[in-house]
Amino acid sequence: MGKWSSTAVLLVLLLMALPGSDALAAVDTLRGTADIADAMLIGYTNCVGELPDEDCRRFNTGAASWLSSGTVGIGREHRTVIALPGWNGIVPDSARLELYCFREGDTVDRRIFAYPLTTPFIEGTELDYGIGNYPDPDSGVTWYHAYLDVGDGDSLNWSTAGGDYTTVACTAIVADTNSWVVFSHFERLLAWWDSTGMAYGCILINENAFPVNSTQKSFYSGESVTGLGPRVLLYRSDGLRGSMRRRQAATMQNHE
């Protein structure tokens, strides 16, 4: 009897290992500047102390090493935009967006919402808002602009300053520094992108609940040398990674 029990267990394990088994799962990870575009939007003036009256709502931070969502004073808000040029368009069974929080304005737990964008943005190439000048030509996304091109004058304004987005959302609670912040159910945004054809990215907005003057939570960007930039984990229960799915789909097309 003991022998047959062992054999049965072995057979079950072998069946679980077969391709297409529900027991298998695959994880695709998007990370780095090839897969993820990100930038911070600055929603106020006078962000550079040595340059009074500078309108930082026109600054681009596409090449900066950090991102931020929340306030650094009353009415002084940061937001973050993230796009996924590395996503293959396949909606996974589940997904999560993760950012590494390295700094916070206060020790209060804060809720941050991720909303899908309804206007595409360009990441831009500015290093930081502290360079002391308005953005160079082809600088990319700002608080005012999905794309700011000072030189050629073909900028694209957001319909509403601070970003154009809809109400579908997933959330994360930022409770501590030096830890990963997880936006669970990120597949909801991917499914919305897929159904609407508007895979333009998402915007991260702090709830800015009381006390509202120091809600800022800061994260490493994809340009950070820490290797702790944003990442998206895509989970699929069929055991096939995205590249394998594409090859499988291509093979089926060729035989039709």
Image (cartoon, rainbow, N blue to C red):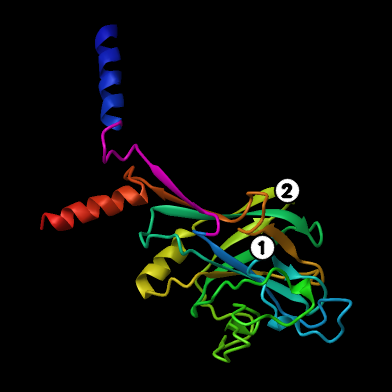
Q: Amino acid at mark 1?
A: Arg
Q: Which residue sits furthest right?
A: 50
Q: Residue at x 60, y 58 (%)?
A: 222
Q: Which residue is mark 2?
A: 178
**In the rendered view, does 86 fall on the left or right side of 179?**
left
Quarter of the image that includes the C terminus: bottom left
Vertical arrangement, residue 10 with respect to residue 21, above or below: above
Vertical arrangement, residue 105 with respect to residue 75, above or below: above
- The reply to whether residue 140 is visible in this rendering is yes
User: In the rendered structure, does residue 146 fall within the stretch colored magenta?
Assistant: no
- Residue range (magenta): 17-33
Q: Residue at x 80, y 71 (%)?
A: 72
Q: CA distance from mark 2 to mark 1?
A: 17 Å
* Dominant SS type (magenta): loop
**Percent position (x, y) of residue 177?**
74, 51
Choose between 120 and 155: the one closer to the eye: 155
**Percent position (x, y) of residue 66?**
69, 61
Question: Residue 249: which disc?
Answer: none
Quadrant of residue 76 in the image? bottom right
**Percent position (x, y) of residue 103?**
77, 56
Quarter of the image that includes the N terminus: top left
Choose between 169 and 158: the one closer to the eye: 158
Quadrant of residue 105 in the image? bottom right
Closest to the camera, between mark 2 and mark 1, is: 2
Q: Amino acid at mark 2?
A: Asn
Q: Which residue is mark 1?
A: 111
Q: Along the polypeptide, which appears first: circle 2 or circle 1?
A: 1
Contact, CB < 8 Å: mark 2 with mark 1?
Answer: no
**In the rendered view, does 38 fall on the left or right side of 248?**
right
- How many residues crowd around disc 2 within 10 Å: few (fewer than 14), some, or many (20 or more)? few
**Percent position (x, y) of residue 12?**
28, 25
Disc 2 is placed on an element classified as loop
